[in-house]
Image (cartoon, rainbow, N blue to C red):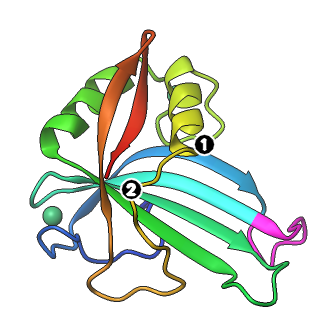
Amino acid sequence: MTRQLTQLQECPICGSKEWRPVLWVKRSGAPHGDKDHQVSFTTLGMDLCQTCGHGVLESYSHDCWSNDEDWDMYWWYVLTPSELARLQSSLAACPTPLSPACPCPLHASLRESGEQLYGGVRSRPFVSPKVPYAWVRMELSEGSLRFKSLS
Ligand SMILES: [Zn+2]
Ligand SMILES: [Zn+2]
């Protein structure tokens, strides 16, 4: 199975490299180098660390318009095993967790709340073994499960 996290190799919590894909939330645009690419490309996806049980959400934003900003930026968010369990029990109702085009209500809610994530993490254009990350929990709001960053 393809991992959702494209840049992060080691779990920021325990250092393990044993990942399992959980969810692909969002994909917009075409990758740089693709014939359909137009300036920007963004993805949001989550893998689970099989060693410590944390979930890691990676937000990737590519934008080759700017001259003074990095083209590729990444943000990482971590869910505790219990928050991840809440998400996974709701995911039982999603027909295609690994499809960023899934039209289910959970996907729609996560896509929307995923855009508003901010936990004081600075983006990085490259990956070092120790990446900065913010904690995220799952919040039930008006019947929809949403990502909520903790700062
Ligand atoms: Zn881990
Ligand atoms: Zn879905």
Task: Identify whether 49 is placed above or below 69.
Answer: above
* Chain-order first, disc 2 or disc 1: 1
Asked if the residues shown at circle 2 and circle 1 are in contact, with their CB atoms under 8 angstroms apart, the answer is no
- Can residue 92 be seen here? The reply is no
Residue at the disc numbered 2: 119
Magenta-drawn segment: 31-40
Secondary structure that dominates the magenta span: loop
Task: Tell me the quarter of the picture where residue 73 sits.
Answer: bottom right
Whether residue 39 is in magenta: the answer is yes
Taking the spot 54% from the left edge, 84% from the top edge, the residue there is 125
Identify the secondary structure beneath mark 2: loop
The amino acid type, in three-letter code, at marker 1 is: Pro
Extreme residue in the top direction: 143
Whether residue 110 is in magenta: the answer is no
Residue at the disc numbered 1: 100
Q: Name the quadrant of the N terminus.
A: bottom left
Identify the secondary structure beneath mark 1: loop
Task: Tell me the quarter of the picture where residue 56 sits.
Answer: bottom left
Horizontal side of 20 relative to 62 (left or right) equals left
Taking the spot 37% from the left edge, 26% from the top edge, the residue there is 91
Judge by depth and name the residue closer to the eye, 144 or 117: 117
Task: Answer few, some or many: residues within 10 Å of disc 1's Cα (few below 14, many 20 plus, some between 14 and 19).
Answer: some
